[in-house]
Structures are given as structure tokens and as C-alpha cells.
Amino acid sequence: MAARKTTFKQQVYDYIFCDVLEGNFPLDQFITEKQLMERYQVGKAPVREALIELCNENVLHSIPRLGYQITPVTERNIMDATELRLDLELHALEKTRQNFTDSMLAQISRLNQDWWQEAISGEVNIKNRWQHNSLFHTTLCSFAGNELAVDVVRKLIQLEWRAYAQMLATPEQRKDFFSQSTSKPHIEMERALSHRDFDTAAALLRQDIMTLLDWLISQTKRRF
């Protein structure tokens, strides 16, 4: 699948989204075009275009005469996103079973190697975690040949990482979450796929997709 061409507007979109992801804009704070122009040292046009796209994707919503606010992610959103990801990604993996190639395995292996090199170098941060997770799952899904499904999966993962930024506000919460959500399932999936063990790969994929929802359920149980 061809890589997406990065435009100036897309760069500004990425800046804003990463700031949302890292919790740099509180949910109750108004974000203005002027503020973003100063923050990223860019002109008005790419900021406005990026804001329009973020509003279309429901990451932000516009408040006339005040600015923009982050759209909260609800528990219902997480449940729906998890359910849809399971349907799309498990179906894509099953569809790939009959035509899985060594070239596909090499792509997965390369992604895992890149991740561990970043982890060893100490360059892992929220943005890198999100990008790696998104790239791994969209690449695996792309092997089924449905580009629309790949785009939906990417947006669902984006929604889940917004939920992460919103719900894991303290270092303790993030440490607890990340202790459960390493890239180990990705390595184990690579191993299963290398043996063409698609049943094990599917079980690992399901486990990985369920990570955020399982964490949320565990937190709910702690409160009662």
C-alpha cells in the first residue's frame, strides 16, 4: 500500500493531534487559531485546514466566537471502537490466511525491529507508541487488500489513543497501563505468523485489540 504524502496541512494536523494525545490541551480549554499559529510558527491557512479536518473527524468541535475544544471520548466510544476493530482486523487476518507471503512476514518483522531499536535507544514516547501501534495494525490489516478497512482501523486506533490521553492523566495511571500494553503481543504474532499458525495469531490479535477496554474494565472494578 502506498505511503500517504505528507502535506503542510497534514504536518500541522499531526502537531495538533499529538498535543491532544499528550494532554497538552485540557478538555475544558478553548483552543484558538492564533494560539496554534504562535505555537507551531505557521500561517493561518494550514492551521484552519487542519482544524476543519480535526472537526470532521470529531477530534475537536468548534465553539462560535470562542474557539475549539477537544471532543471527549466516552466509555461507549471505546466499547464500540473495540468491537469494530475486532470485526475488521480478525476478518482481515482470516482473509489473509490463504495468501500470506514471506514478504508480508518481512514487513511485520521490520516494524517490530524498528520498535525495539527505538525502545533500546530510549526514544519511546506517547507519539512513538501510538504511531508504532497504528502502523503495525494497519499494515497487518492491509494484507487483506481492503484500503477502506485500513483507513477505518487507523481512525479507530486514533480514537483509542485520544481516550488514553483523556483517561490516563497521571504518571501512575500511564505506568499501570503501559505495564499491560507492551509490544510483546506484536512479537508473538510475528512468531505465530512465521509458523503460519493463524489461530494463535488471531488469539493474540484479539488480546492486543482488547487492551484498552480490558484496562478500563479493571479500573471500573477497582472503584466498586
Image (spheres, rainbow, N blue to C red):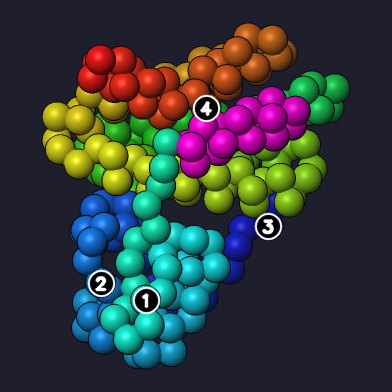
Q: Specify the quadrant that holds the C terminus.
A: top left
Q: Quadrant of residue 50?
A: bottom left
Question: Which numbered disc, 4 or 2, marks the residue closer to the eye?
Answer: 2
The residue carrying mark 2 is 30
Percent position (x, y) of residue 8?
Answer: 46, 78
Is 88 contained in the magenta span?
yes
Of mark 2 and mark 1, the one earlier in the sequence is 2
Of mark 3 and mark 2, the one earlier in the sequence is 3
Prevailing secondary structure class for the magenta stretch in the rendered image: helix
**Label 1, label 3: how many angstroms apart (C-alpha)?**
36 Å
Q: Residues within 10 Å of mark 1 (few under 14, many from 20)?
A: few
Q: Are marks 3 and 4 in contact (CB under 8 Å)?
A: no
| Left or right side of 2 for 60 | left
User: Any mark on residue 2, and which?
Assistant: 3
| Left or right side of 81 for 70 | left
Residue type beneath disc 1: Ile
Element at badge 4? helix
Q: Residues within 10 Å of mark 2 (few under 14, many from 20)?
A: some
**Label 3, label 2: how many angstroms apart (C-alpha)?**
36 Å
The residue carrying mark 4 is 209
Query: Of 158 and 73, which appears nearest the observer?
Result: 73
The reply to whether residue 215 is in sight is no
Q: Is residue 29 above or below residue 115?
A: below
Of mark 4 and mark 2, the one earlier in the sequence is 2
The residue carrying mark 1 is 63
**Label 1, label 4: how many angstroms apart (C-alpha)?**
34 Å
Q: Are marks 1 and 3 in contact (CB under 8 Å)?
A: no
* Residue plotted at (49% across, 76% down): 52
Q: Are marks 4 and 2 in contact (CB under 8 Å)?
A: no
